Amino acid sequence: MKAQTRCIIHNIGHHDLFLELYTPEHQRIGWCRPLSKSIAWIGEAVLNHIQQGSLSYHDPSSLCFEHDLVIPAGQCRFEYNEQSRETFISRETFEVLQGEVRVRSIYAPLVQEIVLSHEPIDHLESAKSRKQGTRPQSLDAIEKVIFFLVTAGAGKNSPRGIAQVIKHIVELRWQDYPQSHQSKYFIDCEHVHTDPHAIMPSQLLGLETRVVAEASQVAEKHGKHWRELFKLYLSVSTGTTFMISALSLSFAEWSPVVQTIASARHILSCTPERPSRVYRPREKEMSSINEWVKLESAQLDQASDLAIDELRDWREAYLEQRQTRPAELKANQKDEEVFFHRKGLKEVLCVVVIKDRFGVEGPKNSLIPIRGINAEVSLPTGTLCAERNAIGTALCRFPRLERRDILAVAVLSLEPSLAKLGPCGACAEWLAKVQEVSPSLRIISFASPAADEVFVKPALHI
């Protein structure tokens, strides 16, 4: 089995870095995190402190300073986050945080767990641990792992310095591993100079370019199998709604694995002194969320229900007449019988439901299902998809048909390998034009040629 390349995008927020604070009299305050308007100053101050080489030790997720980092009174605002018997911050602690405080150690629990999920499973770990998540079983299963720590913002709200601090922590973690391990792991920062509360997918093109470059290296080495060997992960436990949405939209077509930590925004309940796995990330393929949504019949509108029922009837009628598949006919050299599917050797059925606004074939505004089938006598010019076939037939029967009259499109492939078949590029263009004036249009498909489980494309997502 060929080794896999993984690319992880981790969105940095102010939940990513905790500071262990003390008073000038060396009385411990506890673990705190900086509030958003203090992020930039804290990030730069901690980074400068690290670069001065004042580290006494590090573990996989934290650094302890040999000399305290002094933060003057009023310079920064902190949120007390350490879980203890006194869950709520006392007035005394609140007042202490307003004065001069000292940082003795720093802690990055979220990145620690994300990094761990992409490192090989240690041979001492239990069998139960081996079954959880997508951790590689051995170093041989990994060709390369690239971490991008992504930040957005400017001025006091910029977490750019915090990303650099976390990068340093992770790099120190890998220094404890053999050289063969270190050479496979890379980490870098990507900053977007824009407000994270107003970021758009187009502003992440720089990051996308870097991901494409990594994928291209895999494609150059492994050819057409690159998709099986390159996997993208989105770690989006914290950050603004706009940032998470922009990342998801930018990389949805890569079918990434989304990693989320449910307790990421909660009060800190895992520290270097009291380690636990409460931050273990949950993983979900975005393709199963974004591309197709499984629905029950009760969730469908009247037009969609009609499209599904008619398509199932169309399937039964077609299979009753066409009992032999094109591939079987081709094998028997029956070229004329396979003529209309002689290129792809695959059959696709479609039903388009339209509204008969003028009562051409019945009462006005009746819903009319229209059947279609693909024809592939040559590629590409001789290919007619089932969707366009059905729409063309609808126009023949209803010459006054308008785009807004097209309400649902159901597609079924009789080829098992094409389950949940969606519109091709040409059909997607046609349907996108329909959707300009018909936002209720639904694209319906099925899990198998049996047309049993129903899936739909989300609205405005052709």
Image (cartoon, rainbow, N blue to C red):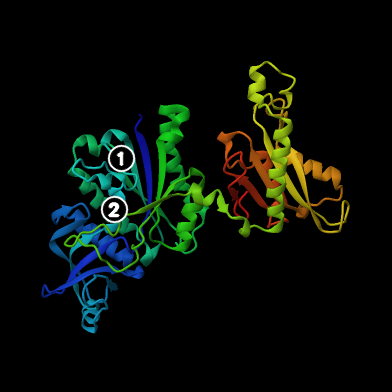
Looking at the image, the residue that sits furthest to the front is 320
Given residues 232 and 128, the one toward you in this image is 128
**Residue 168 locus on image (x, y percent):** 24, 51
What amino acid does circle 2 point to?
Glu
Direction from residue 269 to residue 148 in the image, left or right: right
Give the x, y percent position of residue 227: 45, 35
Q: Which residue is mark 1?
A: 136
For badge 1, the amino acid type reads: Pro
Q: Earlier in the sequence, mark 1 or mark 2?
A: 2
Residue drawn at 23 percent across, 65 percent down? 19
Q: Which residue is mark 2?
A: 113
In the foreground, 45 or 198? 198
Crowd class of label 1 (few under 14; some 14 to 19; many from 20; radius 10 Å): some
Q: Position of residue 432 (x, y in %)?
A: 68, 49
Cα distance in 3D space between marks 1 and 2: 14 Å
Quadrant position of residue 76: bottom left
Residue 344 position (above or below residue 100): above
What residue is shown at x 50% (from left), y 52% (from top)? 289
Q: How many marks?
A: 2
**Disc 1 vs disc 2: which is toward the camera?**
1
* x and y percentages locating residue 216 in the rendered image: 44, 34
